[in-house]
Amino acid sequence: QVQLVESGGGLVQPGGSLTLSCAASGFTFSQSDMSWVRQAPGKGLQWVSSITPTGSNTFDDASVKGRFTISRDNAKNMLYLQMNSLKPEDTAVYYCKRPGYSERGPGTQVTVSS
């Protein structure tokens, strides 16, 4: 079955950086668009970034554009999110998922606070 396991979250000060990872299995990762989404406390899911199967195209929400970079390693079935210049409003649980599918992993908590 599909498994998505996120890691790399933590507590970071404003302006800091984190790199999130997502290990994927149970589907043909190299042929799948992939996305990062997040859920802040008390709010719904928010799309963050997406990447096409070969990694040739990426798309970012305006709130993270220029600060976050999505990437993938198809040989390792891994998805990444490099997050720079973090802001308190980036605080959320981050999930990786396939667009149009409901499965998502347990998520990884990112807290940006001084």
Image: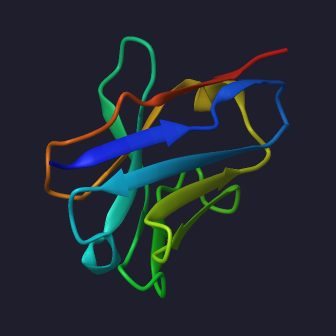
Q: How is the image coloured?
A: rainbow
7, 87: nearer the viewer = 7
Q: Nearer the viewer, residue 10 or 83?
A: 10
Number of numbered discs on residues: 0
Q: Residue at x 59, y 54 (%)?
A: 81
Identify which residue, 40 or 103, lies in the foreground.
103
User: Dividing the picture into quarters, in which one does residue 104 lie?
Assistant: top left
Q: Quadrant of the C terminus?
A: top right
- Quadrant in the rendering for residue 15: top right
Please tell me whether residue 26 is drawn above or below residue 86 in the rendered image: below
Residue 46: give x, y in percent of width and height: 36, 39
Q: Is residue 101 left or right of residue 109?
A: left
* Quarter location, residue 5: top left
When the figure is inspected, residue 73 is found, relative to residue 90, above or below; the finding is: below
Residue 100 horizontal/vertical position (percent): 14, 57
The residue closer to the viewer here, 38 or 87, is 38
The image shows residue 32 at horizontal and vertical percentages of 27, 72
Q: What residue do we see at 30% from left, 56% from top?
A: 25
11 displayed left or right of 110: right
**Residue at horizontal 60 percent and vertical 60 percent from the top:** 65
Which residue is pictured at 84% across the width and 37% down the height?
Answer: 16
